Every structure is written in structure tokens, then in C-alpha cells.
Image: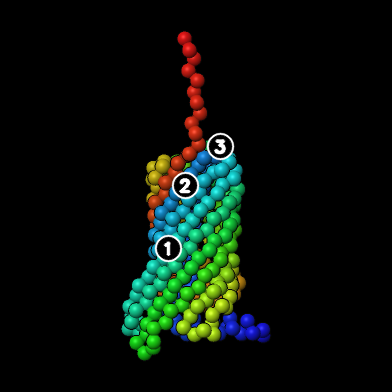
Amino acid sequence: MKPLGIKCVFVLLLLTQTGCVTLYKPNAINTPLLKQQGDFKGTVGMGVSGTGLLNIQSAYGLTNHLGLMLNGMYHYKHSTTDSVIIGKHKQYFGEAGAGYFTAFGSQKNGVLQCFGGGGFGYTNDYYSHTDENHARSTATYNNYFIQPGIAYAAETVEVAFDLRSNYVSIFNIRSSDAFYNDTTFSFINIEPTLTLRAGGKKLKGFIQTGLTIPAYNSEAYFSANNANGFLFGPIFKFSIGLNIALNLSKPEKVSVPTP
């Protein structure tokens, strides 16, 4: 095994043994559901399980079939247990993407979409054991994704299924033990996600649920995201929030005949 591979194994063992270090947490899925040029969708969501605490998402129809998306996530957790006096975790993440969409059906209530893109994140994890010195771990990561989906999108109800695949590379690791610094490891996750929105034409509440399934190098994923959570911990995802829908196209000028 190459020295870098050995180093990666030791990093994973370190993260597993500490049992409280979190270097990565997935963001919520942005399902744009655009139908035409000028459509804008904005979402603010709170992660309940398996995703970051605050997710802000946006999407815009650049043409009748080309869309853009811009998403951000912030996560913060402060915990105190018998074995850990203080545990604090902060994470920041932003991503951008572009993709194809098309509405279909007699009422144009069906939507096919496929988006792809990438993002960058930073995480800072601090903990203090009763029998150990204070420890801090930081890392940065890249996330590249592709996300096909299909949906039913009526005026007051939207139901979408997206199947997102993420390639995540974590690097610039800084920990209390300098041996683990500057090590890189990566993994691939598959995230099937179901999103339900309901409400008015412009403003809807939503719930989103899904799974984060490690498809490649699962040991790295569970070591980087070993926080306990609702039901299946780092596998089950659930979030809630609000979605706004607007059309930002300039209104057509109506000519008024002169008498």
C-alpha cells in the first residue's frame, strides 16, 4: 500500500475511534421544477435529520429548457454528553449547477429535469473529552453532482422524485495530530429523494425525505459523518421549509390602438 493510502486509513481510524468528529454532512436536494423561461424558485429549509441545519436554494429558467441553480447550506450543532464535555460543529457549503428541464402533458403538469454541478465546503469540529485535552479538526471538501428527476407540478401541489449522485473529496484536514494533516479521501453517495410541496400558487410549504446511500468507499463516508440522527443516523434525510415561485420574465407590451 502506498504511503498516502496508509495515511488515509489512519485518518479514518482516528475519526472512527473518536466517535464524535464530523467532517461532512449532505445538503438538502434542490428540485427546481422549472417549466419556462423566467421561472424562479426559491427555498428556505431546515434540516431535521441527515442534512445541514439551514438550506437556502434558488433556481432560474434561463430559457424554456435551460436552468441554473445556486444553493447554500449552514450547519451548527452544540452538544454536551457524559463522555464529551463540549462538542461544537460548524459547516459551510455552497454549490452551483445548470441543467435541462422540460414540461410535458396536456396541462404541462409533468416535469423532466436533469441538473449537474459542483460546490465547495468548509467544516470546523471541536470537542473536549473529560479525560483528554481539547481537540479540533477542520477540513475543506469539493462536491460534484448529477441529479436527474421527474415530477408532477400543478398550481397548488408538487411531487418530485430526484436521484442525485455525489462525488465528495475531503482534503486540507487539520487535526490535533499533525500526522493526519494534508490527507485526502473521497467517496460516492447515491441520494434518492422525494419532495412534496403544497399551498398557494406562489408560496408553498414543503417536506423532503430521502436516503444517503454510500455507493463507493462507504467506510470514508461513515467516518466523516458519524453523527447520530433520527432513525438511520447519517443515512436518513428529512427537512421542512417554504418555497416561493415567481416568473421574472418582462411582461409583454400591449399596444393600445389610437382612435
Looking at the rendering, in which quadrant would you find the N terminus?
A: bottom right
Residue at image mark 3:
106
Label 1 environment density (alpha carbons within 10 Å; few <14, some 14–19, many ≥20): many
Vertical arrangement, residue 219 with respect to residue 45, above or below: below
Three-letter code for the amino acid on which mark 2 is drawn: Lys
Q: Earlier in the sequence, mark 1 or mark 2?
A: 2
* Image quadrant assignment for residue 63: top right
Element assignment for label 3: loop
Residue 241 visible in the displayed image: yes
Vertical arrangement, residue 227 with respect to residue 73, above or below: below
228 and 255: which is toward the camera = 255
- Residue at 39%, 68% in the rendered image: 76
Q: Which mark is residue 74?
A: 1
Three-letter code for the amino acid on which mark 1 is drawn: Tyr
* Image quadrant assignment for residue 36: top right
Q: Is residue 91 left or right of residue 13?
A: left
Q: Which mark is residue 41?
A: 2
Q: Earlier in the sequence, mark 1 or mark 3?
A: 1
Work out how far the residue at label 2 is from the one at label 3, CA to CA, in angstroms: 23 Å
Give the farthest residue toward the right.
1
Q: CB atoms at circles 1 and 3 under 8 Å apart?
A: no
Where residue 17 sits in the image (x, y, percent)? 47, 85
